[in-house]
Image (cartoon, rainbow, N blue to C red):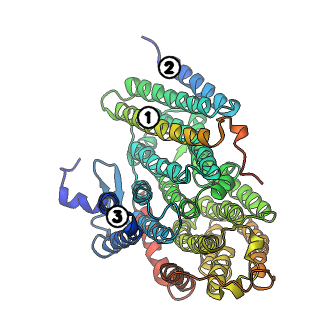
């Protein structure tokens, strides 16, 4: 092992240092500011998070010389880590901005503190290269999320959603952890790269069956975290009951971070070259991912058709989106593997913006009216044309209609599937996006065509929300047009760097 | 000396009891206890593997220590949430907590 070099190791945890400082500042502001000024904590949180992301990209970009394992092999520093970390940090910053006028959350410094800590956990797992770090990071993401979901503790729905999330989440963590302990047992190592190396040698003599059991347990644990069917039971209830900014955050951050981890875990510990007793292990987990993708697409899209509450609908839509992303995971082993990694990273980036836009519009609407049902959105195009336009962009992007970013997100994933020889899966995904188009278009129809009695009561958008939603909408359209090429090249570079090390 | 497989059998049994508890019990606190059982099964696994497979480095022990810490944090948050639910509805039976459905 190389001698420890502090200055060289620091960039690997740059986002974590930035987030820790932010957390301390937020806590101090909560103590120092009087009640009347605490609304500004949201702005401070968002500004620090954006600054962290900007500094990461400007000064501490990993390159071919500096990428590698740091901090005793705990953290991997490479472009893929950076892509997902930046995604999650920007998601958290937008969430903080969207919280600014939500009564009951906006003046509570501890809300932003817990949000930042959860983001910190997400940054840890995007780079995790050790079983201990994988577990610790996952728990650092989810334990704060339990708190956030139950944040309105006097509200029956919020506390119920927190309890359900907690029970399912801790159960999933325990299952995942049992799989991790088996992995440790087979190899005697906790580092993912050391495990991979050991499993390739002749010293590794474990039967195939226990290894497959360990993989299955780990995949089940991850499937809970990314809310893939059939492990999705908690999703609609938690999404509906939790305060809307929390729903927005947990739908993007924990999902993006878990997918980052899933890619690294699958490719590092069970690379395509690994064969036990002549059986290719990767076939097992890619088939498992394909099965989960098919089930998630069916359940998410079909059940979404029947929903009346907008947050429940977005919950089922997010199950379906996990299904699309799992198509990418299933393609990780074939010829399209670089496209698959880059496609998943791009999908998560654009999905973060898209989902936050849709939830942001819901937040503005329910702040003004106190309602969350789809039928209440009737006549929105008269009450607030800009809000209706923002919501439309978000929904079109979720549906994958150009010029919104969702189109290219799906395009890259399907391309990867075809290159890896999973044409049937890509066709199935396309079929299911047609089903999905229906329920997204229904909302747009309600907003633009249906009449409501409140049509003469305009909804005003406060400046912070106006700017946030405007910039996010612009980002979605840009990601679907001019920015596709540079962003996708960037993530593709990260994917190539990942495979160069296998 | 007790062979490794005996530890693994105990651990697997404890884990299965935990899974059964989570799926069959209706009281939120009992479910929390069952999850703790599952985590303890993991700890048995980790320590047994550490002693028999890789006694030369401390990773297994360190892992088990982290599992304790996180389990404690999880129980603290979980019980706080259960108390919040109890204050709202005077019940911690999972079936009674059913406002969100559809």
Q: Quadrant of residue A63?
A: bottom left
Lateral position of residue A57 relative to residue B29, left or right: left
Q: Residue at x 48, y 55 (%)?
A: A261
Q: Which residue is the site of mark 3?
A: A34
Q: CA distance from mark 3 to mark 1?
A: 34 Å
Q: Which mark is residue A89?
A: none
The residue lying toward the viewer, choosing from A279 and A247, is A247
Q: Which mark is residue B7?
A: 2
Lateral position of residue A42 relative to residue B12, left or right: left
Position above or below: B102 against A450: above
Position above or below: B46 against A302: above
Closer to the eye: label 3 or 1: 3
Closer to the eye: label 1 or 2: 1
Q: Secondary structure at mark 3?
A: loop
Mark toward the start of the polypeptide (1 vs 2): 2
Task: Output the chain of dot 2.
Answer: B
Q: CA distance from mark 2 to mark 3?
A: 57 Å
Q: Is disc 2 in the same subunit as disc 3? A: no
Asked if marks 2 and 3 touch (Cβ < 8 Å), the reply is no
Q: Quadrant of residue A298?
A: bottom right
The residue lying toward the viewer, choosing from B77 and A6, is B77
Task: Output the chain of dot 3.
Answer: A
Closer to the eye: label 2 or 3: 3
Q: Which mark is residue B72?
A: 1
Q: Residues within 10 Å of mark 3 (few under 14, many from 20)?
A: few
């Amino acid at each position: 092992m190389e001698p420890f070099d502090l200055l060289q190791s620091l960039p690997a945890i740059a986002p974590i240092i930035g987030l820790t400082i932010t957390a301390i500042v937020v806590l101090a502001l909560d103590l120092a500011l009087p009640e009347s000024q605490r609304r500004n904590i949201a702005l401070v949180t968002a500004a620090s998070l954006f600054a962290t992301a900007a500094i990461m990209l400007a000064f501490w970009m990993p390159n071919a010389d500096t990428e590698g394992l740091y901090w005793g092999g705990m953290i991997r520093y490479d472009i893929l880590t950076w892509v997902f970390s930046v995604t999650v940090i920007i998601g958290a910053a937008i969430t903080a901005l969207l919280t600014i006028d939500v009564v009951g959350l906006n003046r509570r410094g501890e809300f932003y503190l817990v949000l930042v800590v959860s983001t910190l956990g997400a940054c840890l797992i995007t780079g995790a290269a050790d079983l201990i770090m994988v577990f610790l990071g996952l728990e650092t993401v989810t334990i704060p999320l339990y708190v956030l979901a139950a944040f309105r503790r006097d509200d029956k729905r919020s506390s119920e959603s927190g309890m359900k999330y907690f029970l399912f989440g801790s159960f999933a963590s325990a299952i995942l952890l049992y799989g991790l302990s088996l992995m440790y047992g087979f190899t005697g190592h906790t580092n993912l790269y050391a495990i991979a190396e050991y499993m390739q040698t002749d010293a590794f003599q474990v039967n195939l069956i226990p290894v497959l059991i360990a993989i299955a347990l780990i995949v089940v644990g991850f499937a809970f975290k990314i809310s893939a069917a059939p492990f999705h039971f908690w999703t609609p209830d938690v999404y509906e009951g939790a305060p809307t900014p929390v729903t927005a955050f947990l739908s993007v951050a924990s999902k993006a971070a878990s997918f980052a981890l899933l890619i690294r875990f699958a490719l590092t510990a069970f690379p395509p070259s690994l064969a036990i007793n002549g059986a290719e292990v990767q076939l097992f987990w890619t088939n498992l991912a394909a099965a989960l993708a098919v089930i998630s697409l069916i359940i998410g899209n079909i059940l979404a058709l029947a929903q009346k509450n907008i947050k429940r609908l977005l919950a089922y839509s997010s199950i379906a989106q996990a299904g699309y992303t799992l198509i990418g995971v299933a393609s990780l082993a074939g010829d399209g593997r670089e496209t698959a990694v880059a496609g998943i990273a791009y999908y998560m980036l654009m999905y973060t913006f898209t989902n936050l836009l849709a939830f942001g519009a819901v937040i503005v609407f329910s702040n003004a009216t106190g309602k969350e049902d789809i039928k209440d959105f009737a006549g929105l195009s008269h009450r607030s044309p800009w809000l209706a336009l923002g919501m439309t962009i978000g929904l079109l992007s979720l549906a994958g209609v150009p010029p919104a970013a969702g189109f290219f997100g799906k395009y890259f994933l399907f391309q990867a599937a075809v290159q890896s020889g999973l044409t049937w899966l890509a066709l199935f995904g396309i079929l299911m996006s047609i089903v999905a188009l229906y329920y997204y278009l229904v909302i747009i129809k309600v907003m633009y065509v249906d009449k409501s009695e409140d049509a003469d009561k305009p909804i005003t958008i406060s400046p912070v929300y106006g700017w946030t939603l405007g910039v996010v909408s612009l980002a979605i359209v840009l990601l679907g047009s001019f920015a596709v090429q540079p962003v996708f090249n960037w993530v593709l570079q990260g994917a190539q760097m990942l495979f160069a090390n296998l | 000396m007790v062979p490794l497989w005996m530890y693994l059998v105990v651990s697997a049994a404890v884990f299965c009891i935990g899974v059964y508890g989570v799926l069959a019990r209706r009281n939120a606190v009992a479910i929390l206890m069952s999850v703790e059982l599952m985590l303890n099964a993991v700890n048995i696994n980790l320590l047994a593997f550490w002693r028999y497979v890789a006694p030369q480095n401390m990773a297994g022990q360190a892992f088990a220590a982290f599992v304790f810490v996180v389990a404690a944090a999880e129980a603290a948050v979980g019980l706080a949430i259960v108390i919040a639910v109890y204050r709202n509805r005077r019940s911690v039976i999972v079936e009674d907590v059913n406002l969100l459905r559809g």
